[in-house]
Image: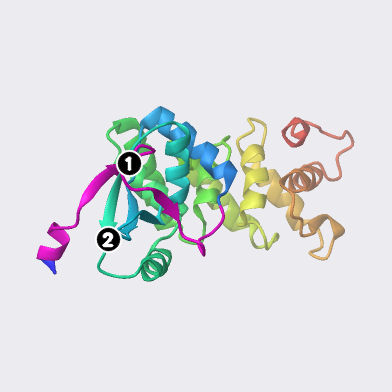
Amino acid sequence: MKEEMEKTPIVYIGLDSKKPVEFMENNRPINNALVKRLEESMKKYGILSALTVYDTGDSYLIVDGQHRWTAASNLGLSMPAIITSNFSAMEAVMEMNTIGKNWSMPDYVEFYSNHDDPNIRNVYSTLRTKKRHNSEYNYGSIQQIFCYPTQPKALKEGIVRIVDEEMGDEIIRYLNELEGYLPLAKTTRFITAFAYMANHEEYSHSRMMRKLKGINKSSPLLVCISNPIDYGRMLTKIFNRNQTKNLTMFRSSWL
């Protein structure tokens, strides 16, 4: 088996290849948006991943990488290709679809935790540790808590930065207390809204808890919402409840 793997041929194929390159009839259709993204990646970083092709004798049949091949062809680039000929092309496609998977957030965190740049490596290693110690939160929530304010995709792009680790730990404590009054306090949407509020210089958590303790748990104020903006408005109403003068210090965060 080891000897067979060592003999697996790798060639470069392009539009000028001696053998034509073909797609399998039953493979998924080409997604043009994905091709455009791959083209941008190739312009920036070059070819990062080889194709897998089946050598039919007369042509190379793409087993894995038809989007990469299309993008490279559009740019006039040749690509490395691993050639398989010891099983049928259809079996190869089934195998690739079975073992392959898209990266999840933990995959991105693990990748950047081993980055050459020490700043990136340290940030993601810290986030990985925070997630391990707070397993009830997903990485989207961990990002909102420790890296405010950032867009969700920033974690995948390696550009998140921890603003205040101590404050992030404090927000974790706040959320544990809020959960007794707001059952969805540990959902990502709620955390997205609350992180803005908790990081505000005029936020007082002791005041928020006093207000919550004075509200009946069946109050319409404590509704389940799916939009972070609405959660923000709800939190502001609770924080300002029974004020003679309505405070609006958090309003700009939700608009």
Q: Give the range drawn in magenta.
A: 3-29
Q: Residue 84 carries which label?
A: 2
Write down the quadrant of residue 246 in the picture. Answer: top right
Residue at 61% x, 42% y: name it.
195
| Residue 180 among magenta residues | no
Residue at 70% x, 44% y: name it.
207
Sequence-earlier tag: 1 or 2: 1
Q: What residue type is labelled 1?
A: Ser
Quadrant for the N terminus in the image: bottom left
Residue at 88% x, 33% y: name it.
245
Q: How crowded is mark 1: few (under 14 residues within 10 Å), some or many (20 or more)?
A: few
Label tally: 2
Tell me where residue 85 appears, x and y as whole percent: 26, 64
Whether residue 159 can be seen here: no
Q: How far apart are marks 1 and 2 (CA)?
A: 17 Å
Quadrant for the C terminus in the image: top right
Q: Nearer the viewer, residue 157 or 33?
A: 33
Q: Which residue lies furthest to the right in this view?
A: 244
Tell me where residue 154 appears, x and y as whole percent: 51, 38
Residue for badge 1 = 17
Query: In the figure, is residue 14 to the left or right of 146?
Result: left
Residue at 52% x, 57% y: name it.
137
Q: What residue type is labelled 2?
A: Thr
Write down the quadrant of residue 29 in the picture. Answer: bottom right
Tell me where residue 72 appears, x and y as whole percent: 42, 37
Whether residue 171 can be seen here: yes
Tell me where residue 58 appears, x and y as whole percent: 33, 56
- What secondary structure is marked by label 2? strand
